[in-house]
């Protein structure tokens, strides 16, 4: 059914695993669609009480595919609205899923990967986990509603720090800031995540659905408008010299030289 993710259901816990380990689970456009569709399906499944999202191997997700960015720069086709809009729709599916959604952040969650983790209701991390809002390092403002969710979780000051610096936030720091729900040891991350998920999955799922509906209605009312604006910002910045320089520098393993153009 799916080509870039794995899914399973055990003991009322559904798991969505981003399964592109050869690219550190970087997203293809199909991945955004598949994660969204799996969330929609599990949200309606009466045998599911909670959902865990994670990545195969060492990392949660490296985010966007840099090689694809080079291609649209070289071809001068640039970024279409489809890509960043799909990232936003994936985040919306996570936010509006009636079941509790838990990110098990194994290793790095960068760019859209961090955005997906932040759109979840809970994040379980370990010391080797990293949340990296890496967009600015590529001359881009950000997608996946990452800025929006960081602002909701820890306020605008920390959101600006994460977005503008683009530096890794380790698991212990994320927990200290309030970005993570639980801090597990590296070797018990999976065990503690599923213990947490089991505690939730066997409780009143209908009540959870109503809680999430109220949260979304009153605390996240601007999400759709935000995604429209961030999509426009991503497309505009994809045409800049700074973005092209950042992509080429990344692939050439050197520091970029930005010109503000």
Image: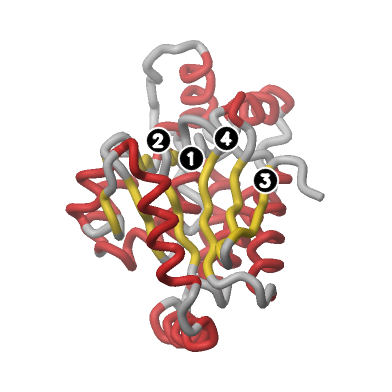
- 171 in relation to 42, above or below: above
Percent x, y of residue 132: 37, 40
Percent x, y of residue 240: 53, 34
Percent x, y of residue 176: 17, 53
Viewer can see residue 239: no
Q: Crowdedness of circle 4 by 10 Å Cα count: few (<14), some, many (20+)?
A: many
Q: CA distance from mark 1 to mark 3?
A: 13 Å
Q: CA distance from mark 2 to mark 3?
A: 18 Å
| Mark 3 / mark 4, whichever is N-terminal | 3
Which residue: 47% across, 48% down? Answer: 142
| Mark 4 / mark 1, whichever is N-terminal | 4
Residue at the extreme left of the image, as rendered: 176
Please state which of the two labelled residues, at mark 2 or mark 3, is closer to the viewer: 3
Q: For residue 107, which numbered disc appears in the image?
A: 2
Which quadrant of the structure image shows residue 85? bottom right
Mark 4, secondary structure of its residue = loop
The residue carrying mark 3 is 6
The residue carrying mark 4 is 25
Mark 2, secondary structure of its residue = loop
| Mark 2 / mark 1, whichever is N-terminal | 1
Asked if labels 4 and 3 touch by Cβ distance under 8 angstroms, the answer is no
The residue carrying mark 1 is 60
Q: CA distance from mark 2 to mark 1?
A: 6 Å
| Mark 1 / mark 3, whichever is N-terminal | 3
- 202 in relation to 191, above or below: below
Asked if labels 1 and 4 touch by Cβ distance under 8 angstroms, the answer is yes
Q: Crowdedness of circle 1 by 10 Å Cα count: few (<14), some, many (20+)?
A: many
Please state which of the two labelled residues, at mark 1 or mark 3, is closer to the viewer: 3
Which residue: 47% across, 25% down? Answer: 246
Which residue: 69% across, 25% down? Answer: 71
């Amino acid at each position: 059914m799916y080509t870039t993710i794995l899914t399973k259901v055990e003991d009322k816990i559904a798991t969505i695993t981003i399964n592109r380990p050869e690219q550190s689970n970087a997203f293809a456009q199909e991945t955004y669609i598949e994660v969204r569709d799996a969330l929609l399906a599990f949200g309606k499944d009466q045998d599911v009480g909670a959902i865990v999202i994670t990545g195969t191997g060492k990392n949660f997700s490296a985010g966007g595919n840099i090689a694809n960015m080079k291609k649209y720069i070289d071809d001068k086709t640039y970024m279409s609205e489809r890509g960043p809009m799909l990232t936003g729709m994936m985040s919306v599916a996570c936010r509006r899923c009636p079941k509790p959604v838990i990110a098990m952040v194994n290793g790095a969650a960068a760019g859209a990967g961090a955005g997906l983790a932040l759109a979840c209701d809970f994040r379980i991390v370990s010391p080797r986990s990293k949340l990296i809002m890496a967009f600015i390092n590529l001359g881009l403002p950000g997608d996946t509603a990452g800025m929006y969710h960081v602002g909701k979780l820890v306020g605008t000051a920390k959101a600006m720090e994460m977005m503008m610096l683009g530096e890794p936030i380790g698991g212990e720091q994320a927990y200290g800031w309030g970005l993570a729900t639980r801090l597990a040891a590296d070797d018990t991350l999976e065990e503690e995540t599923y213990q947490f998920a089991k505690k939730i999955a066997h409780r009143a799922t209908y009540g959870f659905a109503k809680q999430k509906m109220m949260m979304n209605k009153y605390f996240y009312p601007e999400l759709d408008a935000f995604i429209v604006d961030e999509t426009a910002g991503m497309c505009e910045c994809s045409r800049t010299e700074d973005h092209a320089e950042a992509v080429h520098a990344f692939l050439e393993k050197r520091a970029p030289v930005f010109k503000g153009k």
